[in-house]
Amino acid sequence: MHPQLSDKSEACRDFIKALELCHTSSWKRLTGGCNDQKSALIRCLRKESRERSSRNRAAAKERRQRTEQVWKELHEDD
């Protein structure tokens, strides 16, 4: 398994296994017979990345709002 794929969540695990299974046949791997499996895996990984980015963006926005609120409260005490 590729190192960058070893830590991916269960969401894409089936796609990873399908690509690895296809790659056991050197002929398919070398002649483009695994392109469909690879494309499906890439779509899954991109979707997972977009979802993770959205969650991170929302969490960062929430943290920023809390920080601004704390700074506002500190400046009101002055």
Image (cartoon, rainbow, N blue to C red):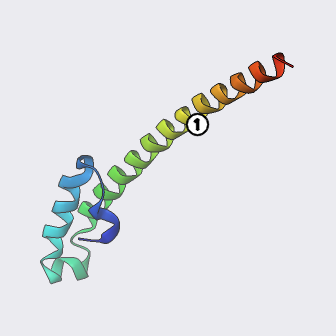
Q: Nearer the viewer, residue 17 or 75?
A: 75
Q: Quadrant of residue 40?
A: bottom left
Instruction: Determine whether, in the image, residue 21 is placed left or right of residue 38.
Output: left
Residue extending farthest to the right is 78
**Residue at horizontal 13 percent and vertical 77 percent from the top:** 24
Which quadrant would the C terminus be assigned to in this image? top right
At label 1, counting other C-alpha atoms closer than 10 Å, the crowd grade (few under 14, some 14-19, many 20 or more) is few
Residue 21 percent location from the top left of the image: 13, 68
Residue 11 percent location from the top left of the image: 25, 46
- Residue 30 vs 5, above or below: the answer is below
Residue extending farthest to the front is 78
Q: Quadrant of residue 42?
A: bottom left
Instruction: Determine whether, in the image, residue 1 is placed left or right of residue 65.
Output: left
Residue extending farthest to the top is 76
**Residue at horizontal 24 percent and vertical 82 percent from the top:** 30
- Residue 15 vs 55, above or below: the answer is below
**Residue at horizontal 82 percent and vertical 16 percent from the top:** 76
Which quadrant would the N terminus be assigned to in this image? bottom left
Badge 1 amino acid: Ala
- Badge 1 marks a residue whose secondary structure is helix
Location of mark 1 (residue):
60
Exactly how many numbered labels are in the figure?
A: 1
